[in-house]
Image (cartoon, rainbow, N blue to C red):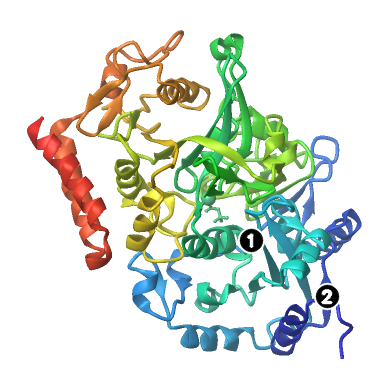
Amino acid sequence: MREMASSLEPLNRWVDEVARLTRPDRIHWCDGSDAEYDSLVETMLGTGDLIALNPETNPRSYLHRSHPSDVARVEHLTFVCTPKEDDAGPNNHWMAPADAHAKIDALFDGAMSGRTMYVIPYCMGPIDSPIARCGVEITDSPYVVANMRIMTRMGTPALKRIEREGRFVRGLHSTGDLDPSRRFIMHFPDELSIKSIGSGYGGNALLGKKCHALRIASYQARQEGWLAEHMLIVGVENPKGEKHYIAAAFPSACGKTNLAMLIPTEGHRKDGWKIWTVGDDICWMTPGEDGRLWAINPEAGYFGVAPGTGPNTNPSALATLSHDAIFTNVALTADNRPWWEGLGEGEPVTDWQGRPYDKANGPAAHPNSRFTVSAKQCPSWAPEAEEARGVPLSAIVFGGRRPSLVPLVFEARDWAHGVLVGAAMGSETTAAATGAVGVLRRDSMAMKPFCGYNFADYFAHWLSFDQPGAHLPKIFHVNWFRKDGDGAFMWPGYGDNLRVLEWMIGRVEGTVPGLETPIGTVPAAGELNVRDLALRNGALSELLNVDIEGWRAELDHIGEYLDSFGERMPERLKAERKRVGDALVAA
Ligand code: SAT
Ligand code: MN
């Protein structure tokens, strides 16, 4: 009999059960200590799972190369296993729970033999926060343990909370044999459990992230009256020293990390604007007694996209990455520094697969190569990210990659309209998931790959926050990705996006009137701060223009999309679509 490792009997029982099924050589309960992390790194340096980077330029930093067929989330192999198929919705792949357990347990049979099984207690959110939730991930991947240590509050304090609460999300993971035909990521929201096998990569394997903090949490949040969202949280401090917190949902690899760490342009800096980073990917929000929505970042680190991160796009991220970072699937320079497209300095000599770099093989770094780093290393890290009650939200922003039609910014007229704007979100696909890149798809609230239940019910849940006494954030939509006839981006983005945030804050504070249009309120002439901004002639009016004809067609598409969910789609949302559609016809 194994020595008991926790005072919580159901946890010990589950660990025993998993060990009987997967047959590891050893079991290690993670305490989250520095010594444990150092010894894991030592082990991985020995096995080649990690490669040490140049200690002069990148102290205590490492490169991990995943299997070339295992470099992104796999949405076609990701299942939500609710007892009733309809509850998972057309937005998810579904399998009956019993079938899913049988299928995946057969793959777990003996999967850990010869390996160490790690038991990782973790907490999503500040350890003393009532909004935070705990889980335990069992994995045979030391790379996963190291990443979970950076991305979550992991180890003894989390175990203590789990023992106190008696309730935790169970996540079972094995890298298996990495054969894509034996790869599955399965969610059992009713059982608060996750089983993932056959991938060692990011969102497939770090179960605290998308699997727990979004798919399982969104399901729990609906039952408990809160929201688990794919959003960054940023604090914007104005020259008066007042902070407004904004949560923004963009699909994977559409700039959430960059917006969360925005560096104000010189003009804004001189005026006294400051940016505070609370989170870059996930936001849990809950109504407070004051009627406002209060938000926490359940994560403790960033798992960000490396390519495109450079001195002009995100100098804060570069500073964050200067030590104690894990890089996955980036390239290397001759002096063993990490390299990726857009870094802006150095030359790659070894590509992400460890081959001598050759342009003919494509990019040196994989387009979905990533960094893992503690949030606290970010120069703009907001200390209030540790606040148990979270931060109050002034605004929620939706956005995606839309090369045409969608203006730079518009504001929904009320909460229900805002829910429609979020539900109707569309974006071109990126390298963050396997499959074609650059195809327009509807990605409601950027949650298409992450909502753990039927989108129709999810929209109804969003609508339900509109209650008497609620002081809900204003809802906006942005599009940084408009292109002109030559295919060039029309808006500079990055630090200049603060111009748009400034307008939003003006709207929140009631100091700018805006211009009403059938799709929402856009900045009236002169309202957007464009001081020192060089745009092409006519670009600004085009960026803020509402193309009535184009929007009529868009509203038709949105109507078809909402109808695809059938009976369950809330009437309120359909009515809202009709209202906007009618306004466009009348315009
Ligand atoms: O691989 S992750 O899902 O963690 C990152 C992402 O796609 O947003
Ligand atoms: Mn994400």
Report the front residue among 221 and 355: 221
Disc 1 from disc 2: Cα separation: 20 Å
Q: Residue type at mark 1: give it.
A: Gly
| Residue 341 visible within the image | no
| Horizontal and vertical percent position of residue 168 | 67, 69
Left or right: where 454 falls relative to 360: left
Query: Residue 6 — which label?
Result: 2
Residue 275 spot, x, y in % from top left: 61, 26
In the picture of the structure, the residue carrying the numbered disc 1 is 208
CA neighbours of label 1 inside 10 A, class few (<14), some (14 to 19), many (20+): many
Residue 226, compared with residue 57, is above or below; it is below
Farthest-out residue, right: 35
Q: Position of residue 429 (x, y in %)?
A: 39, 50
Whether the residues at callouts 1 and 2 have beta carbons within 8 Å, the answer is no
Disc 2 element: loop
Residue at point 58% right, 42% down?
280
Query: Which residue is drawn at the image coordinates 45% and 64% (left, top)?
Result: 75
Nearer to us in this view, 364 or 89: 89
* Amino acid found under the numbered disc labelled 2: Ser
Q: Quadrant of the C terminus?
A: top left
Q: Note whether residue 332 is visible.
A: yes
Q: Quadrant of residue 96?
A: bottom left
> In the displayed structure, does residue 349 sit left or right of residue 418?
right
Residue lying at 35% horizontally and 62% vertically, measured from the top left: 457
Q: Residues within 10 Å of mark 2 (few under 14, many from 20)?
A: some
The answer to which of 171 and 116 lies nearer the viewer is 171
